Image: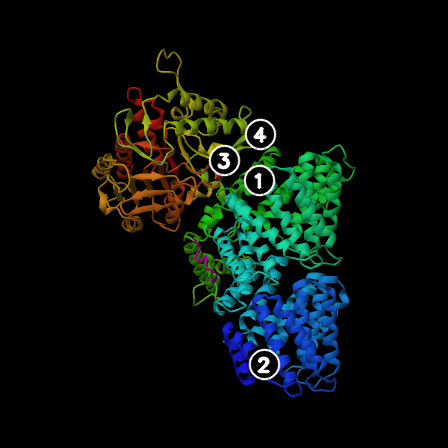
Amino acid sequence: MQILARRAYEQYGTRGDLDALEASIQCYRVAVGATEDDHPEKVDIINNLGVVLGRRFKCTGECQDLEEAISLQQLANALTPDDSTVKPSRLSNLAVSIFSRFKREGRTEDLEEAIGLWTRAIELVPDSHVHKPGLLNNLGSSHQTRFKQLGKLEDLKSAISLHARAVELTPDSHPDKPSLLNNSGNSHVTRFLQLGKLEDLESAISLHARAVELTPDGHPDKPSRLNNSGNSHATRFEQLGKLEDLESAIALHARAVDLTTDGHPDKPSLLNSSGLSHRTRFERLGLIEDLESAIKLLTDTAELTPDGHSNKPARLSNLAGSLVRRYERTRDLKDLEKAIAYQSRAVDLTPDGHPEKPSYLNNLGAVLQTKFEQSGSLDDLDQAITHQTNTVSLAPEGHPNKPRWLHNLSNLLFERFNEACNAPDLEEAIRCSTCSVELLPKNHAARASRLRLLGLLFDARLHSPHAQADDATRAMDAYLEAMQHSKSHPLERLRACRQYTDLLSEFPHLFTTPPRLALLDAYKYALELVPRCIWLGNNVRGRYTSEELPVIGAVVNDAVTAAISAGEYGLALEWLETGRAVVWSQVLQLRTPLDDLQQLHPQLADDLYHVSQALQHAATSPSGSLSSSPKAHSAQPSLKGQALSSHTYALEYEKLVTQIHELDGFKDFLLPKTLSQLAGACAAGPVVVINAHKSRCDALVLYGAGDIAHVPLPDLSLLCAKFIQKLLWDTLRAKRLLNRCRGNTRDEFEHDDRGGRVTAMDPSDLMRIILAELWNRVVKPIMDVVCTLIPSSATLPHVTWCPTGPLAFLPLHAAGIYPERKGRNTDSQTVMDIAISSYTPTLEALLKPRTSLAAGCAEYPKVLVVSQPDTPNCASIPETRTEAGIVMSLIEHSTPLDDTEGTIQAVLEGMATHDWVHLACHGVQNRADPMDSAFALYDGRLTLSSLMSQHLPNADLAVLSACQTATGDEKLSEEAVHLAAGMLNAGYKSVIGTMWSISDYIAPEVMRVFYTVMAEQVKAGGELQPAYALHEAMKALRNKPGGVDDFMRWVPFVHFGL
């Protein structure tokens, strides 16, 4: 029976087969009952039964198995004399079981007994004994555990020494060497977390890597060693913030999961680590795919872990934390309710005195804080504070998590102070936050967030009745250290910059000497952080949905205002360019010509080109070439050969750019453009940049050879601009001109529309008010200055508008005084009477080479004409076919794609081979997901994300005769997230778009005039001027009887670009 029992146990060891383990236990039970007490093998059988019962406990968490194992092993030890050669191994087996009971119940006496048993076993064997390294290893692990419970550094020192001795005594060829290396690495990680010495973390990573390397594929412990190696990389990421470590952790964890069969007892532990690494990447990069992966992995972990298992509370807690993150993103209350239930259960399952109890109480406090933010109930906040206070009081001195728990308690107290203005809460919050910062290692990646909270607390006291003399300076110093902490998350540093500058603006006289930064120097520092906040490794959709963009927009707005106030107009324009359309700029940066670099450093140029191409592809793919499955990262990638993840490409891109900056003549490579480089943007006429801030509103006019004129706008406020925008959009919504639905009935509606319907109710009065307000408050003061800056000419000047904030959604090109139709006794004053208008998302978009033709050019232009009169699942818009016929009659080299011919593939292929494209179809601005804004073609949607992946260097003009192609997203006003900007990004120099839905019957009239003028320009040669052609088309509409007052018809047409 013993032989059968051993074979079954060996089968379990190689396959993880629980049925084999069960068979082994049954065979040993039969053997125990069948063997006489005085039989020489009886003690062996008792001991072995104890061992296999202990193994089943680890798989199932069944306490009865553990208690029986301990009883059997105690009996075996009592029956084994001290001079027996097997005594050390039996002492060790008993220690293992008692140690397991400690991990389950947290009783210190069990830990002490296990340490005593292993110490005694070691004393019984010489260094040459085959089991000596294993005993040293186990004793080291128990000392490490005692350190975690009691915080005594002597235990940690002993653990590292014992593990190192075990490794030293074991040759590389020994099968136990990887295990000993692995545990030695774990003890170094623990000491790093305690003392913050990087050499310990580096040693841990090296030891774990060596353990993985020495473990052959197929070995049952390979997954666990991969897992620990991933954990050490994850720890280094948490400390230093290097994304390379996070990517390595995810890859290692995923490989560990892949190598472990379903049903294996270690599977839940490996799924847990993989889920946590995905959650960490979500917290760093904001990709919802990572959070969904984390929740799936952690749900599987919790479900696979039986009740009673020692790790059940930890896994429930991890799942709860991830559900809270998803609630914060989606606001689905079901996630919050589940999180509270799971976290409460984790606390209930953990006995008092258990070393993990403080951690679970901390997490419960955090979940209840989130519930308070949802419910507003002070009871929730009080409960959270109670749990968090208990967490801190239970944490021993020196506990590695104590700084974080103190920070969390401080944050909760600050929240209650803001609610109830209770001064003792603020004082206690300051005390806890100060302790947290003092205990945190200087190079810890979380240091900026801890310092920023401390600054906020001093800032709050400064503005309370309990202010102290040094509150301002202490807040300032905390913010300054946070913003300059290079290891921390760029967004936390940027937030600290904003708080620093806010305080500096309030008390400029207090902070005039180094090492503190002056106001503009601080903003310069903040603007240098902007590119680091929006990471290239995310796909574009992930970048647009991240929390960073609104923060960036606010900081840039503040910085530009400060520069204008200081009279630094050139700096203001440079900063505005740096912080505006950040994501577009990143995509365009990947297309930067590399001619100079290619000539001097061809290998670097080739590497950068290939990495840039890969990033362009990943940027617009649905998930950035990242599978939401953790199996997507099963191997460490290299630059050439197999495909890399977009994250790895982004890291490689950053390394290459850093290398290039170190080369002679390339220190400014891909850095934001200076004013001298941006001056060419006004080659065709003045460019007007408008900045609307809560403290003031201004326009900067770039003209001539790069000169700047400042135009204060005293009659405009940010609040006023927001009100005008709301008034416009409410009007458009009421008329269904911002809706996605379209109708084709003609009963109470005046016209069928491509994106909405205009009702018989006249909206002219409201539009007249809106356009007059824009004229008086914004456009007239600017044009009064512009007209003095440019020489008189028979032709109207060309003005390009670059508005920011809510002004980005307003029709500045149509601003003016429009007298009412009846009893007109005043002259109109409109911008269209004195200038031709265009728009641009950035100054850089105007730096493209302009199209200039020889007179009578025979081969230009080639025009792709797309018409969709009957797109499936959309309302019929028959006049698109009429419109297409007009274009083809006026432009000689035209290629039609009508109705069923207008597929996504055909249109994209045609765009690549034609100079101009005309799209007469339905268009939709998707407000829930701007990247899903699209042209409706015969076989589906040509989305903005698809357009962003196109690179058409020879493209010239795009006419988007569709609805809402230049509307944008009000939450991302600085990012120009609309189809017109997408066409500029793809390479088109000029784009005609629409700010809201247009009439199917008006579009052909507009295009007849537009293309007539464009055909005349082509025939005459010289520079093409699409803005002028559109201006003439709008004049023609306005000159029709009643045309001027029909604002909804002619105002939406706009020109972007050159």
**Dot 4: element:** loop
Whether the magenta-drawn stretch holds residue 421 is answered as no
Sequence-wise, the earlier of marks 2 and 4 is 2
Identified by mark 1, the residue type is: Gln
Taking the image as shown, residue 1051 lies to the left or right of residue 463, namely: left
Sequence-wise, the earlier of marks 3 and 1 is 1
Sequence-wise, the earlier of marks 3 and 4 is 4
Residue 175's mark? 2
Which quadrant of the rendered structure holds the N terminus? Answer: bottom right
Q: Which residues are magenta?
A: 623-630
Res 90 seen here: yes
Residue contact at pointers 3 and 1, CB within 8 angstroms: no
Res 524 seen here: no
Question: Which residue bears the numbered disc 3?
Answer: 804
- Where residue 878 appears, x then y in whole percent? 23, 35
The one nearer the camera, 527 or 13, is: 13
**Dot 2: element:** loop
**Dot 1: element:** helix
Residue contact at pointers 2 and 4, CB within 8 angstroms: no
Residue contact at pointers 3 and 2, CB within 8 angstroms: no
Which quadrant of the rendered structure holds the C terminus? Answer: top left
